Image (spheres, rainbow, N blue to C red):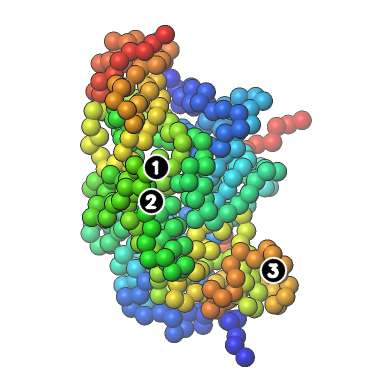
């Protein structure tokens, strides 16, 4: 019997990692990041990784941990503003960086997972990100050709999952996770709640289990980058 | 006298219309949410995957799974929906958002915008800004008129790497409001002066050419 359920993040990555690999990692900022699998990736000591992720975590947490251990050779991201070590390594020439507009990055992952080799977008026309890329005019407007992205491994985080690998995300923790789940040659998902097959409403499933090779129940810190609150007015 | 951050946000809020779907950038643009006119229905989109953004949470409502694009904790509304990043940018790129209000480092009189990096000094990244300016129906920039060293940020030619070419419709600075004919050849027009700012002052502090259309 095929089994997708693994007991911990370390065993869930076994056989899926190798030096020089490309990894997609879901999440936006620290929201919806596969925190257990990132730690397991660090502990695997795999080197020279190309990481595709919107951000690079913060100093000391999320993908920031893999920057500190110098396991990342190259990042493909849209925004790295909150990570000092990231900026330092990039400006010192220790880290390669390919900036992608956020929507282009999302669509490249979606396209990669859907077998679409490339697509034309208006985003970035006339800017650095379009340099060296083919352009084409449609209805009088210029579009730039962007390619689909695939990874050797994608690591994603969902709220609920079942033994089949069906996934449900929660609130804005969904972000890049669904597309990245489709675009990894292998995909490992970590979830807060793992239920027996049949307990999820089939109409509510965001990512069908076909995309998920392995699933593991994690424990989560769920750190918050900007805790902004308002005060209750006294009645 | 020039406009304060809150006055800038207040002026930008005048660009809102009833029924609009709006994306607000980080910084002063976020403050625009505080000045949505009474009785006007505006739905805020957050590009990390949410439509119908509510106010900041009370301490006991904070949810790590519910943040805006500035990574700030926020709340949902009755009308809220959540979606993936690719759905979010389909909304943005596909022209379904009415208005984007965002900050800038430089703008030129043809509507070119630079707001994502300073080579060799600052690497932040464009985030969703390039998609927003390429796809949203109307783009309004809110920024300080000059940089910290006093240089004009309204230029004939941007010097920093661009976010978009011919994308900005309106620029609101602490000194005044300018309209840009981004797809045409009309000169940039000065529409309004901030309180206590003279035409002489704004002319002296603006490198780009403009014509006065003050009423």
Can see residue B66? yes
Query: Tag 2, which secondary structure?
Result: strand
Q: Quarter-wise, where is residue B214 in the image?
A: top left
Are the residues tagged 3 and 2 within 8 Å (C-beta)?
A: no
Q: Residue furthest front?
A: A139
Q: Give the number of the disc on residue A207.
A: none
Reading the image, the residue beneath label 2 is A121
Q: Earlier in the sequence, mark 3 or mark 2?
A: 2
Give the left or right position of residue A161, taking residue B175 as reference. Answer: right
Give the Cα distance between marks 3 and 2: 33 Å
| The N terminus of chain B sits in image quarter | top left
Reading the image, the residue beneath label 1 is B134
| The C terminus of chain B sits in image quarter | top left
Q: Residue at x 47, y 83 (%)?
A: A14
In this rendering, the answer to whether A126 lies above or below A7 is above
Give the Cα distance between marks 3 and 1: 36 Å
The chain containing the residue under callout 1 comes to: B
Foreground: A38 or B139? B139
Where residue A4 appears, x then y in whole percent? Answer: 58, 82
């Amino acid at each position: 019997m095929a089994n997708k359920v693994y007991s911990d993040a370390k065993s869930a990555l076994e056989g899926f990692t190798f030096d020089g690999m490309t990894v997609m990692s879901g999440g936006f900022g620290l929201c919806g990041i596969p925190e257990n699998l990132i730690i397991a990736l660090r502990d695997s000591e795999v080197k020279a990784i190309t990481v595709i992720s919107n951000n690079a975590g913060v100093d000391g947490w999320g993908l920031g941990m893999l920057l500190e251990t110098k396991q990342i050779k190259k990042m493909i991201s849209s925004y790295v503003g909150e990570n000092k070590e990231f900026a330092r390594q990039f400006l010192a020439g220790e880290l390669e960086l390919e900036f992608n507009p956020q929507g282009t990055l999302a669509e490249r992952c979606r396209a990669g997972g859907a077998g679409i080799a490339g697509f034309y977008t208006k985003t970035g026309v006339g800017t650095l990100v379009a340099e060296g890329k083919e352009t084409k005019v449609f209805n009088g407007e210029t579009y730039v050709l962007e390619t689909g992205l695939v990874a050797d491994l994608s690591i994603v985080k969902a709220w609920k999952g079942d033994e089949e690998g069906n996934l449900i995300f929660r609130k804005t923790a969904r972000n890049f996770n669904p597309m990245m789940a489709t675009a990894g040659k292998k995909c490992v998902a970590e979830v807060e709640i793992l239920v027996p097959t049949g307990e999820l409403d089939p109409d509510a499933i965001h990512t069908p289990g076909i995309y998920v090779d392995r699933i593991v129940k994690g424990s989560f810190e769920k750190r918050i980058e900007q805790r902004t609150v308002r005060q209750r007015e006294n009645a | 006298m020039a406009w304060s951050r809150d006055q800038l946000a207040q002026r930008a809020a005048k660009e809102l219309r009833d029924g609009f779907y709006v994306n607000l950038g980080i910084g002063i643009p976020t403050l625009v949410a505080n000045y949505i006119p009474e009785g006007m229905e505006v739905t805020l989109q957050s590009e990390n995957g949410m439509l119908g953004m509510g106010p900041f949470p009370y301490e006991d409502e904070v949810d790590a799974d519910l943040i805006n694009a500035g990574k700030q904790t926020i709340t949902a509304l009755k009308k809220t929906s959540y979606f993936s990043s690719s759905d979010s940018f389909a909304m943005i790129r596909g022209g379904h958002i009415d208005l984007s209000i965002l900050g800038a480092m430089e703008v030129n009189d043809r509507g070119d915008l630079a707001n994502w990096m300073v080579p060799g000094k600052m690497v932040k990244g464009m985030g969703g800004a390039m998609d927003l300016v390429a796809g949203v129906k109307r783009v309004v920039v809110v920024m300080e008129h000059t940089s910290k060293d006093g240089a004009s940020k309204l230029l004939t030619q941007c010097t920093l790497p661009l976010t978009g070419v011919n994308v900005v419709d309106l620029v609101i600075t602490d000194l005044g409001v300018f309209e840009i004919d981004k797809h045409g050849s009309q000169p940039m027009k000065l529409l309004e002066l901030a309180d206590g700012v003279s035409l002489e002052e704004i002319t002296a502090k603006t490198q780009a050419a403009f014509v006065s259309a003050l009423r």
